[in-house]
Amino acid sequence: MHKLLGGLKEGLIFVLSAPAGTGKTTLVRMLCDEFDCVQESVSFTTRSARANEVQGRDYFFISTAEFEKRIADNDFLEYAKVFGNYYGTSRSLVEQQIKMGKYVVLIIDTQGALQLMGRLQAVFIFLIPPSMSELRRRLEDRKSDSPEVIEQRLSWAESEIAIANRYDYQIVNDHLKTAYEVLRSILIAEEHKRVIPNAASH
Ligand code: ADP
Ligand code: 5GP
């Protein structure tokens, strides 16, 4: 069967950043639903789980002491403190997925992405909310954060958007289907940059 995506022996890494509430999780779930080869990297965090979140699916929820031990052991490809909690990407999990030919999406904040730029071969994508008022509406509608947390996230959003131009691609997530078409086109195009030297033998 001919596949639109997933033709590389060794996978690719996509780094996706956006202010909280822009739609990263929604868009990446759409990619994973359409393409078997796309996998979201599951991060480690010291934040507590929200009501609908599952250990090992949304995050690996761990204590601060355990997180700090993992920092000391150099287990993280990158990590950052976001809104008072640690978040980090496991180096070994990403390496395993790449070796299996998976296209791994890291949903990480701008601090983490800046640590990786120039150091990791990856495609950097920034998702932009259509406006600050729409971002507020999405955060409020999602009903997962308190009003104080929402204010904190909105004030941080502006400084994140300010460095969007450091990324390889920028997508405005206004109309969901349009943003998704752009995102999937980027993955397809990136595979074709590499298809000749890295092609799987059939
Ligand atoms: P993030 O992962 O960036 O924090 P989510 O994917 O959780 O954001 O999306 C935040 C909220 O906005 C969710 O309720 C989601 O259904 C909604 N949403 C995402 N994209 C759009 C869009 N293009 N138009 C309207 N609502 C959207
Ligand atoms: P949330 O608490 O809403 O799940 O995520 C808050 C922020 O942490 C988001 O901007 C998200 O991209 C970021 N984040 C999640 N996982 C990681 C990670 O492993 N590393 C870094 N640097 N940021 C992360």
Image (cartoon, rainbow, N blue to C red):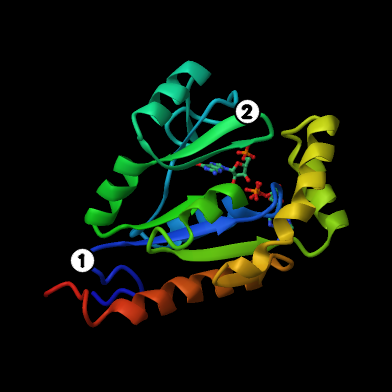
Q: What is the crowding at mark 2: few (fewer than 14 residues within 10 Å), some, or many (at least 20)?
A: few
State which quadrant residue 81 falls in: top right
Decide if ligand 2 comes within 8 Å of the CB at mark 2. Answer: no
Q: Which residue is mark 2?
A: 50
Instruction: Classify the position of the C terminus by image quarter.
Output: bottom left
Can residue 177 be seen here? The reply is no
Q: Secondary structure at mark 2?
A: loop
Residue 158 in the figure: left or right of residue 12: right
Check disc 1 and give the amino acid type.
Lys
Q: Which residue is mark 1?
A: 9
Residue at the (43%, 79%) spot, across then down: 189
Residue nearest the observer in this picture, 134 or 47: 47
Instruction: Classify the position of the N terminus by image quarter.
Output: bottom left
Q: Residue furthest left?
A: 202
> Depth-wise, is mark 2 or mark 1 nearer the camera?
1
Residue 65 location (% of width, % of height): 47, 17
Q: Quadrant of ligand 2?
A: top right
The numbered dot on residue 86 is none
Up-down relation of residue 94 to residue 2 (above or below): above
Residue 96 in the figure: left or right of residue 142: left
Up-down relation of residue 53 to residue 17 (above or below): above
Residue at the (69%, 65%) spot, across then down: 173
Residue at the (63%, 26%) spot, across then down: 51
State which quadrant residue 179 falls in: bottom right
Residue 68 location (% of width, % of height): 46, 24
